């Protein structure tokens, strides 16, 4: 596809909502997933640490 202007490029031949929405959603997922995984890992490590301390204190 050939674009004659920047506005034609951003309009994407009438499919701009689909194209840019897809790019935006993909970017959001690629940024959000590592953040969610990191938060889940921290929570799991905190829970394991608390469980270990609890076991040590009860012995």
Image (spheres, rainbow, N blue to C red):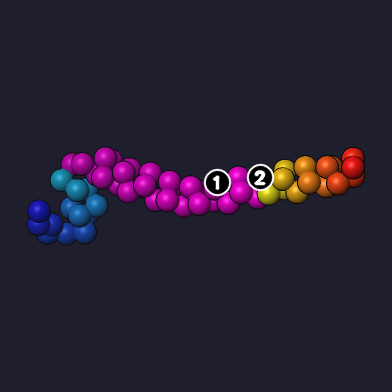
**Label 2 residue SS:** helix
Residue 38 position within the rendered picture, expressed as x and y whole percent measured from the top left: 58, 51
Image quadrant for the C terminus? top right
Residue 46 left/right relative to 30: right
**Relative depth, front residue between 4 and 22:** 22
Q: Which residues are magenta?
A: 14-42
Residue 47 position within the rendered picture, expressed as x and y whole percent measured from the top left: 72, 43
Assess disc 2: are there few (<14), some (14-19) or many (≥20) residues with their C-alpha within 10 Å of its C-alpha: few
Work out whether mark 2 precedes mark 1 in sequence or the reverse, and give the earlier one.
1
**Residue shown at 26% from the left, 45% from the top:** 19
Residue 16 left/right relative to 55: left
**Residue shown at 24% from the left, 52% from the top:** 10
**Relative depth, front residue between 25 and 3:** 25
- Say which mark, if any, is on residue 48: none
**Label 1 residue SS:** helix
Q: CA distance from mark 2 to mark 1?
A: 12 Å
* Residue reaching furthest to the front: 59
**Residue shown at 9% from the left, 57% from the top:** 2
| Residue ID for mark 1 | 36
| Residue ID for mark 2 | 44
* Residue reaching furthest to the left: 2
Asked if residue 23 is among those painted magenta in the image, a careful observer would answer: yes
**Relative depth, front residue between 21 and 50:** 50
């Amino acid at each position: 596809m050939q674009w004659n202007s920047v506005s034609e490029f951003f309009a994407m031949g009438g499919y701009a909502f689909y194209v840019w929405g897809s790019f935006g959603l993909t970017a959001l997922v690629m940024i959000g997933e590592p953040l969610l995984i990191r938060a889940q890992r921290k929570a799991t490590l905190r829970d394991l640490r608390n469980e270990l301390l609890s076991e040590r204190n009860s012995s």
